[in-house]
Image (cartoon, helix red, strand yellow):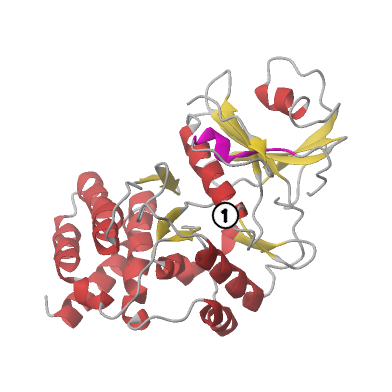
Amino acid sequence: MASVALLSASSPSTSSAASLLPRRHPSRRSACFPRAASKLSVVAAMGDDPIKEWILTEGKATKITGTSSIGGGCINAAQRYETDAGSFFVKTNRRIGPAMFEGEALGLKAMYDTKSIRVPLPYKVGSLPTGGSFIIMEFIQFGRSRGDQSALGMKLAEMHKAAKSDKGYGFHVENTIGSTPQINTWTADWIEFYSKHRLGYQLELISQRFGDSAIYEKGQRLIENMHPLFDGAVIEPCLLHGDLWSGNISSDTNGDPVILDPACYYGHNEAEFGMSWCAGFGGEFYNSYFEVMPKQPGFEKRRDLYLLYHYLNHYNLFGSGYRSSAMSIIDDYLRMLKA
């Protein structure tokens, strides 16, 4: 769809994808992403600009006083819009249609609705008239640090505990992990879902892009033999952020944890730690997490299995520098499983 219409955060939910997102409340003054910005520039007339149009109508602003560029990562551009109704955070992509941002917005809204950990509330997704797409969301002013590890662990566990799916494992739409498509077809069995739509899909991409038959064949052997790693574990489809690394974790000015830029789906809660190799989770984080979501039998044996998905994705995104890490994990499991 070209544009996602948004409802009030307090409005009753409906079954349509568009209705999962909220309309901005007139009194909201919350302010995302306070990295150093360029000097504010005064914005003139609205013109043929769907971003300004939404801010000056549905966003309840009467004037835009300025914009400033913010670090938006390697995929999207990002700006802060200052208005007389508060600040808005806007991401744009001049090459990709709105499907990517629709997936992000639906994920943010799903996490927001758990009333657990703080996330920026999405307001509007649409197409740009010159090509590409945009998302408008709540601007959260970040604090001076990434926040308290104990609080992050507790709040993340509360989100996992609060949001379960009765459809199985997957998500309402396909989304992206970085810029890689993430397939979220609803599946009743977790091992089947993770085998096919996570490890298997990444291995297929590697085979197609790099012709790497060795890692593909060993990876398939692991998939065929990994069932014993889940013996004794109780697995439920929990709402996951899906891409939780240090760049997607911060805190607000009150010191409360904030997570952003998700690749959401419903999956085994342990899969949330798949990016822990660049997230900086420490003992306080895990201790607080497991107080809310108890550690399952075999957790340590499965830990690297969930790292593997992200190492394979980094291989696909950034090249063979990540191959050795992925292959090492696969080889270790094949030895462990005698496969």
The residue range painted magenta reads: 16-24
Q: 26 left or right of 111?
A: right
When the figure is inspected, residue 168 is found, relative to residue 326, above or below; the finding is: above
Q: x%, y% of residue 20?
A: 56, 40
Quarter the C terminus occupies = bottom left
**Residue for point 74% across, 28% down:** 58
In depth, the one of 112 and 334 nearer the eye is 112
Q: x%, y% of residue 208?
A: 21, 45
Q: 242 left or right of 46?
A: left
Q: x%, y% of residue 297?
A: 34, 83
Q: x%, y% of residue 289?
A: 54, 77
Q: Does the magenta portion include 97?
A: no
Which quadrant holds residue 213?
A: bottom left
When the figure is inspected, residue 331 is found, relative to residue 95, above or below; the finding is: below
Q: Residue furthest top?
A: 47
**Residue for point 55% across, 29% down:** 133
**Residue for point 51% across, 68% down:** 161
Label tally: 1
In depth, the one of 34 and 88 nearer the eye is 88
Q: Residue furthest front?
A: 12
In depth, the one of 191 and 243 nearer the eye is 191
**Residue for point 57% across, 28% down:** 126
Residue at which label 1 appears:
111
In depth, the one of 92 and 114 nearer the eye is 114
Which quadrant holds residue 334?
A: bottom left
Residue type of the residue flagged with mark 1: Met
Dot 1: element? helix
When the figure is inspected, residue 252 is found, relative to residue 170, above or below; the finding is: below
Which quadrant holds residue 253?
A: bottom right
Circle 1: is it few (<14), some (14-19), or many (20+) Cα within 10 Å?
Answer: many
Q: 5 left or right of 27?
A: left
